């Protein structure tokens, strides 16, 4: 008898991003999905609602909700979205202490109940939280990564496509560094059907796109007023889940553990990774200009400040 493997995808945090990840994973039939949250009824309600859309949308994924970590046992992939979202006027570093405590608790449970899983952290401030998760989980670094670069480059792709009035499908780009105002969008690796954007747009338009990308999260926060983005973030995390469970080896910018790459040591930051069944299977080292290298290192300093703040507060 042929038995296909059904993957088990756990989403911790059934808020805006988490529920949307569950929905997108169901739509793509990536596996069975378990939503979990500290709020009683919330993951159960969202899971039931997503299940009830199944007959219409045509997916077969089993989606369940729970408040009990025992139910995450056997997870192949865990997406961590638990935490507070950024409010207007709040910096990502403001979130550090509260989300640090949440991530520590969540990771203790993942290590206990799903020790063989691959973990994708989404919670902000992203690069610091994924470093904390790596330390708390004790998993090999290939199995712990953060989602930010897929989102930041999706935003840049959308802005380039809007500017040129071309299909977003034709636009490829790469955004490195930490998730925040110090991220490093790379126009030299941005192409439209293979044509470098430097040949299609004047410098000031490219600079404006780079700036809008850097402020992409804040732009949505300012519009929504009572929350932060979740459709594009959830779509981005889902793309990472898809690449892993289908072993697609897609090259995606992810927050990965750096052990000398780009001249950086013992830090998590956004770099191009080959993602597959083993997690982060390889990190690609792109040739960067002096300016880009300097921006990347500035970005790393921001992450180290966050790590130090956690250490000072005894969270790390
Ligand atoms: O690019 C990126 N990495 C990001 C990050 C893009 C968008 C959002 N980003 C961050 O993800 C955001 O700043 C937050 O830190 C998280 C989740 O954002 P979301 O918009 O989904 O926040 P919600 O809607 O407030 O949901 C958070 C849920 C909520 O239901 C809480 O009850 C739950 O997390 N929560 C917990 N679940 C499990 N365990 C614990 N301890 C816990 N604490 C809170």
Image: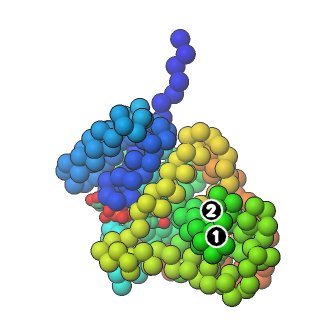
Do we see residue 303 in this rendering? Answer: no
Q: Position of residue 9 (x, y in %)?
A: 44, 42
Q: Residue furthest left?
A: 40
Do we see residue 35 in this rendering? Answer: yes
- Label 2 to label 1: alpha-carbon separation: 9 Å
* 40 over 135 or under it: above or below: above
Please report the residue visible at 66 percent of the width from the left and 50 percent of the height from the top: 250
- Quadrant in which the C terminus is drawn: bottom left
* Colour convention of the picture: rainbow
Q: Residue furthest front?
A: 165
Marks 2 and 1 close (CB-CB < 8 Å): no
* 147 over 183 or under it: above or below: above
Please report the residue visible at 41 percent of the width from the left and 67 percent of the height from the top: 229
Q: Residue furthest top?
A: 1
Q: Position of residue 184 (x, y in %)?
A: 64, 76
* Label 1 packing within 10 angstroms: few (<14), some (14-19), many (20+): few
Secondary structure of the residue carrying numbered label 1: loop
Please report the residue visible at 44 percent of the width from the left and 48 percent of the height from the top: 24
- Name the disc covering residue 165, or none: 1
Q: Nearer the viewer, mark 2 or mark 1?
A: 1
* Label 2 packing within 10 angstroms: few (<14), some (14-19), many (20+): some
Q: What residue is shown with label 2?
A: 168
| Residue 41 shown left or right of residue 200 in the figure | left
Specify whether tag 1 is near ligand 1 (CB below 8 Å): no
Question: How many numbered marks, from 0 up?
Answer: 2
Occupied quadrant, residue 94: bottom left
Closer to the camera in the image, 114 or 198: 198
Ligand 1 is in which quadrant of the figure? bottom left
Closer to the camera in the image, 167 or 252: 167
Q: Position of residue 311 (x, y in %)?
A: 44, 74
Secondary structure of the residue carrying numbered label 2: helix
Q: Position of residue 36 (x, y in %)?
A: 31, 48
């Amino acid at each position: 008898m042929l038995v296909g493997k059904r993957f088990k995808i756990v989403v911790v945090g059934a808020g805006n991003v988490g529920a949307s990840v569950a929905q997108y994973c169901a739509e793509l039939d990536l596996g069975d999905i378990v939503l979990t949250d500290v709020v009683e009824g919330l993951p159960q309600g969202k899971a039931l609602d997503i299940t009830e859309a199944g007959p219409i949308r045509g997916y077969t994924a089993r989606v369940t909700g729970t408040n009990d970590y025992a139910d995450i046992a056997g997870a192949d992939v865990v997406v961590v979205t638990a935490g507070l979202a950024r409010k207007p006027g709040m910096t990502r570093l403001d979130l550090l202490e509260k989300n640090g405590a949440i991530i520590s608790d969540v990771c203790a449970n993942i290590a206990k109940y799903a020790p063989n899983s691959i973990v994708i952290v989404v919670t902000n401030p992203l690069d610091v939280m994924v470093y904390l998760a790596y330390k708390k989980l004790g998993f090999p670094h290939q199995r712990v990564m953060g989602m930010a670069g897929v989102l930041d480059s999706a935003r840049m792709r959308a802005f380039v496509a809007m500017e040129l009035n071309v299909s977003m499908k034709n636009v490829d780009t790469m955004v490195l560094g930490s998730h925040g105002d110090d991220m490093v969008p790379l126009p030299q690796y941005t192409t439209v059907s293979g044509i470098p954007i430097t040949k299609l747009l004047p410098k000031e338009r490219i600079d404006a796109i780079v700036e809008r990308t850097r402020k992409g999260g804040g732009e949505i926060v300012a519009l929504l007023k009572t929350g932060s983005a979740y459709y594009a973030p959830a779509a981005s995390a889902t793309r990472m889940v898809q690449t892993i469970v289908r072993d697609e080896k897609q090259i995606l910018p992810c927050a990965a553990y750096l052990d000398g790459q780009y001249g950086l040591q013992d830090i998590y930051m956004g770099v191009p990774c080959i993602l597959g069944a083993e997690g982060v299977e390889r990190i690609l080292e792109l040739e960067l200009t002096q300016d880009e290298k300097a921006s990347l290192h500035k970005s790393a300093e921001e992450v180290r400040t966050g790590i130090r703040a956690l250490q000072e507060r005894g969270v790390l």
